[in-house]
Image: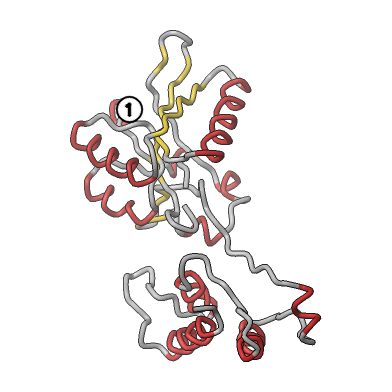
Amino acid sequence: MKRLRHLLLLSFFALAIITTFSACASKQANTSTNRVKITFWHGMTGDRKTALNKIIRNFNESQSKYQVVGSSQGDFASVQQKITAAAKSKTLPTIAQTAYTNVPEYVRGGFITPFNSYISKSDLSDIYPVFLQSSTYQGKYYAMPFSKSVRILFYNKDLLKKYGLSVPATWTDIQKDGIKLKARGITAIAFDQSFLTELGGLCRQAGTPLLTNKLKTNLGKKQTLTATRMCQVLVGCTSN
């Protein structure tokens, strides 16, 4: 019971994406309502904060056993700083939002608990495998997807029609069309912040992720170099 009061299950794929939510509760009772109180720190702001508060409110109203107490800790960077400080002062919340890449550090610090015993396989069946995989560390679930992002490619149908181009079905198609449009002075493609997500996706799709589960890199592999050249060409098709 004491261990659970200091439980911290996390995850959030910071940046793009994608980020995460833990699915375990503290056994600390709320004496005023006789509910199990679950303190939840997050870094949602604006519309995302409004939507999250609604989800929390709806959950609390749907049953009488648990009470989630959401607490915005400012922006995402602020949450991470407060988690680190709270770990030192032993004032951690039940669950918190963080980057899944922080999990190894938290495991070494001894203040994060796996929730394998709190969740069944059926509970995980509707989660995309790639999101679920990023939530594991050393064979245990320390995090659950919460604020994940998925890349979506939008295309200009009118522009394709004007220049006699078909809707691209492969990255090679995008590359070829991009070169043609660039020659006409048209920005062919735009990336969100950078092309690193696309590079990582291409490498993983080719079976050579940039970083393996055993923390080995595939930077020198033929597939990685091919994907890098592809991204370089695509960047060349963007505006300066």
Q: Position of residue 124 (x, y in %)?
A: 57, 48
Identified at 45% across, 20% down, the residue is 36
**For residue 83, what is the image quadrant?**
top left
The N terminus appears in which quarter of the rendering?
A: top left
Q: Position of residue 189 (x, y in %)?
A: 60, 76
Q: Position of residue 61 (x, y in %)?
A: 61, 20
The reply, left or right, for residue 100 in relation to residue 152 is left
Q: Position of residue 174 (x, y in %)?
A: 64, 83
| Extreme residue in the front direction | 185
In this rendering, the answer to whether 149 lies above or below 63 is below
- Provide the secondary structure element on which disc 1 rests: helix
**Mark 1 belongs to which amino acid?**
Arg
Identified at 52% across, 53% down, the residue is 148
In this rendering, the answer to whether 192 lies above or below 145 is below
Residue on which the image places disc 1: 5
Dot 1 alpha-carbon crowd within 10 angstroms: few under 14, some 14 to 19, many 20 or more: some
